[in-house]
Image (cartoon, grey):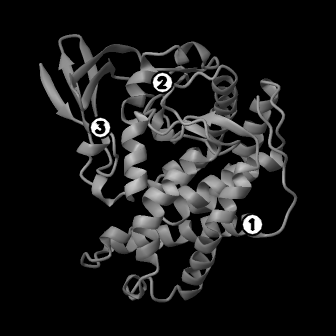
Amino acid sequence: MAIEPVDYPFGTPTTEDAFRVRLPGETLFVKIIRSFRRWPLFHTLPPDLAEQAMASGLWHYEADLYSSGVGALLPPGMRLPVVHHVADLDDDRIAIVMENVEVTDRPWDPDRFARAARLLARLNVRLTRADALPASAPRVPGFMSGVHYRGRLLTADLPMLADDRTWAHPLLAPHGELRSTMARLARELPAVMDRLRDLPQLLIHGDASPQNLLTTEDGTFVVIDWTLGGMDAVGTDLAQLLIGLAHAGFVAVTDLPALRTRVIDAYTAGLADEDFPADREAVRRGLDGGLLLRSAFTALPLTRLHEPLTGELAGLIEARLALTAYLCELGSGLVRPGPRSPAVSC
C-alpha cells in the first residue's frame, strides 16, 4: 500500500487533507473534511458570519450530498464519483473514501466548455425543482455570493486593494486606472448583489470549474468538490467554469471572450432543455456577476507581492493584471443602467 498526498488550496475552509491510497489493483481517493472551527483562518471571519457558519452545518455538506439522492438527478453525461465509504473520524472531521477518477489527457476545448455549460444548466434546474441539495445548503437567494463578499472580500482582498502600499509594487504602480476602476466597482458590489437577487434563482454547485468537472475518456463529467452549493442567480455556476483554467494559466485571457459567448449560449440552451423560464440576458448577467464577486478582486496574487521579483512572479502578475482588467470590464457592464429581469422560481 502507498499513500500519496494531493495538493489542495490552503485557504479551503472545510478541507483538512486529501490523498490517494494505492492498493494492489485499485487506487482510492480520500478526502478529510473538517468543522469550520478547525480551519486556521476561521478567526478572520466577522463574528456574525463565524457564528452563522458554525450553526449552519455546512462543513459536512459534501458528505451529506454524497449520501443523498443527488446522483440520480444529474443529466446524462454527468455523474458523481463512486463513494465507497463515509466515516466520522470525530465530532469535527469526516473521511470520504471514493474512486480515483481516471481523466482524459485531452485538453479542454471550446466544444467541451459548451457541453459542460449546457449540462450545468440542466443540473441547476433539476437540483432546484427537486430541492435536492442537503438541508444545510442555503435556500436564500444570493446567499453564497453574500458569504464570499463578507467572508473574503470585505475582510481580506478589498482592504489590501485599498492600501497604497499594494499599488506601490513596481508592476502594479503603472496601473492607476485599473486601481480606480476596481475601487469604483467595489463600491457598487452591494447594488450588484441586489440586482443578482432579482434574477431567476437556482440551486448551484458553487465551484464548477473545469478542475471539478473531471472528464473521463468517454467524455463523461464526474462532478466533485461539492462544498459551496446553495441558491444563487441563474448563470452563476458558469463563472468558475469560464475562469478556472484561465486563473490557473492554462487558458489565455484573449480566448475568454469567445469562450464566454459559447458558454452563455450553451447554458441558455440547457435551460430550454429543462423548460426553465430564463433568457440569455439573465444568464449573461448571472455569469458576469459571479465573475465580479468571485474573481475580479481575487485574481491579483496579493499575498505574493512581498516576494523577490523573479521572472516567474513578474509573468504571473502581468497575466493576472490582464485577467483582472477583463473581469473589471465585464463587471462595469453590470453597473450601467439596464432592464431588470423579474424573479422566477421553479
- x 42%, y 72%: residue: 317
Q: Residue 19, image x and y in percent?
A: 23, 31
Quadrant of residue 87 within the rendered picture:
top left
| Mark 3 crowdedness (10 Å alpha carbons): few <14, some 14-19, many ≥20 | many
Q: Is the residue under label 1 in contact with that under label 3 (CB below 8 Å)?
A: no
Q: Residue 201, image x and y in percent?
A: 71, 39
Which residue does the numbered mark 1 point to in the structure image?
333
Q: Residue 200, image x and y in percent?
A: 76, 41
The residue under label 3 is which amino acid type?
Ser
Q: Nearer the viewer, residue 223 or 113?
A: 223
Q: Which mark is residue 64?
A: none
C-alpha gap between disc 2 and disc 1: 37 Å
C-alpha gap between disc 3 and disc 1: 38 Å
User: Which dot, 3 or 1, sits closer to the camera?
Assistant: 3
- x 48%, y 16%: residue: 68
C-alpha gap between disc 3 and disc 2: 31 Å
User: Which dot, 2 or 1, sits closer to the camera?
Assistant: 1
- x 38%, y 24%: residue: 63
The residue under label 1 is which amino acid type?
Gly
Which residue does the numbered mark 2 point to in the structure image?
216
| Mark 1 crowdedness (10 Å alpha carbons): few <14, some 14-19, many ≥20 | few
The residue under label 2 is which amino acid type?
Thr
Q: Earlier in the sequence, mark 2 or mark 1?
A: 2
